[in-house]
Amino acid sequence: MPTVLRKRGWRFFFYPNEGNEPPHIHVQKAGMEGKFWLNPHTKDIQAAYTHNLGPAELREVRAIIKEHFDELISAWNRLRNQPRS
């Protein structure tokens, strides 16, 4: 689970073996978690699932993702292009 960003207590990470899923990021903080699809063409952010995230936390996570969108997509592409053993 490579962590690519930590901000305001949130951990942003990928699972390395998720098959051929489109770009996305997992988030986790104090019993809250979620998965967000990232569209690199439109920079759209869509929640795939959330657990224990209220409206304020969702806004915060979306704002962080938006602020670091290009960085997250770059990390996704680096992870996907790594040779697998």
Image: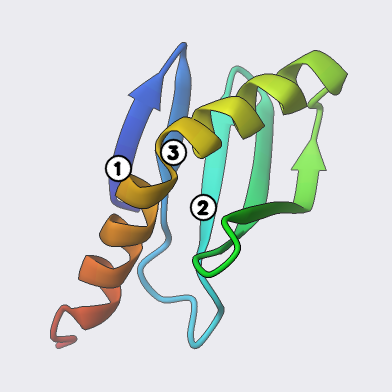
Q: Earlier in the sequence, mark 2 or mark 1?
A: 1
Q: Earlier in the sequence, mark 3 or mark 1?
A: 1
Which circle marks residue 12 in the picture? 3
Q: CA distance from mark 3 to mark 2?
A: 6 Å
Q: CA distance from mark 2 to mark 1?
A: 9 Å
Give the residue number, with chain letter if any, for mark 2. 25
Q: Nearer the viewer, residue 5 or 85?
A: 5
Contact between marks 3 and 1 (CB within 8 A): the answer is: yes
Contact between marks 2 and 1 (CB within 8 A): the answer is: yes
- Relative horizontal placement of residue 23, taking residue 37 as reference (left or right): left
The amino acid type of the residue labelled 1 equals Val
**Residue drawn at the location 75% of the way across and 27% of the way down:** 58
**Image coordinates for residue 17, horizontal then vertical, percent:** 40, 76
Contact between marks 3 and 2 (CB within 8 A): the answer is: yes
Query: In the figure, 32 relative to 71: above or below?
Result: above
The amino acid type of the residue labelled 2 equals Ile
The amino acid type of the residue labelled 3 equals Phe
Give the residue number, with chain letter if any, for mark 1. 4
Color style of the picture: rainbow
Q: Secondary structure at mark 1?
A: strand
